[in-house]
Image: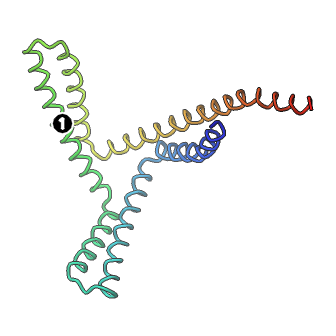
């Protein structure tokens, strides 16, 4: 079982390194990272559209396939060229959703106060934070994406550091627990 843990943790060295590197890139270069991911997604959608057109010419003469292929190519090009607008629109909609949820939570907190529930104060504070977050995202959606990207990068770095600490601990535990077994086996060989 201990050897199995060592093998798993040895494999996790790859995820530790990747998480640390990706985290640094996301933290230091959020704009370029979002641009790269958007262009990668756009190119993928374009390739799907081209694949639909290839299928149209080689296998299926379906008008729907040709229309979907054309729409995919157009959507992919728009995603590559206008990624900031698209990301901002998606984040703006997310901000609206968060704002509405915060307002609903605030109304629930007011109802909780009317019913003499003690948890109403926590609900008011959490709903106020949610409303503020929603407003921030709505007012400046693209900068919000950059901050979220940087937070994701920081989270990946923390994950990598914590996983590295876990890796070191498991190696020490296994080494400590195997030492008595190795000493006992060596003792058996010297007794013979």
Residue at image point 68% right, 29% down: 172
Where residue 168 sits in the image (x, y, percent)? 65, 32
Number of numbered discs overlaid on the protein picture: 1
Q: Which residue is mark 1?
A: 99
Q: Please tell me whether mark 1 sits on a helix, a strand or a loop.
A: helix
Residue at image point 52% right, 44% down: 19
| Foreground residue among 12 and 76 | 12
Where residue 121 sits in the image (x, y, percent)? 20, 16
Where residue 94 sits in the image (x, y, percent)? 23, 44
Q: Quadrant of the N terminus?
A: top right
| Foreground residue among 54 and 153 | 54
Residue at image point 61% right, 35% down: 167
Residue 109 image-quadrant placement: top left
Residue 108 image-quadrant placement: top left
Residue 146 image-quadrant placement: top left
| Foreground residue among 30 and 112 | 112
Left or right, residue 51 beside residue 16: left
Left or right, residue 139 beside residue 38: left
| Foreground residue among 182 and 62 | 182
Q: Tell me: residue 79, above or below residue 168.
A: below
Coloration of the structure image: rainbow
Left or right, residue 85 beside residue 31: left
Residue at image point 55% right, 42% down: 20
Q: Tell me: residue 35, above or below residue 124.
A: below
Q: Quadrant of the C terminus?
A: top right
Left or right, residue 12 beside residue 38: right
Q: Tell me: residue 46, above or below residue 3.
A: below
């Amino acid at each position: 079982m201990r050897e199995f843990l060592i093998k798993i943790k040895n494999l996790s060295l790859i995820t530790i390194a990747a998480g640390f590197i990706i985290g640094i890139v996301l933290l230091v270069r959020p704009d370029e990272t979002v641009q790269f991911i958007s262009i990668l997604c756009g190119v993928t959608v374009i390739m799907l559209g081209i694949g639909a057109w290839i299928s149209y010419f080689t296998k299926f003469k379906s008008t729907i396939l040709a229309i979907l292929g054309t729409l995919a190519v157009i959507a992919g090009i728009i995603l590559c060229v206008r990624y900031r607008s698209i990301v901002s629109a998606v984040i703006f909609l997310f901000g609206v959703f968060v704002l509405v949820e915060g307002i609903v939570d605030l109304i629930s907190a007011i109802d909780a106060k009317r019913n003499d529930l003690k948890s109403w104060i926590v609900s008011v504070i959490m709903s106020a934070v949610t409303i503020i977050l929603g407003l921030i995202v709505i007012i400046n959606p693209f900068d919000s994406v950059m901050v979220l990207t940087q937070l994701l990068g920081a989270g990946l770095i923390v994950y990598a550091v914590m996983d590295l600490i876990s890796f070191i601990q498991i190696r020490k535990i296994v080494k400590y627990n195997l030492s008595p077994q190795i000493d006992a086996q060596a003792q058996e060989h010297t007794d013979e």
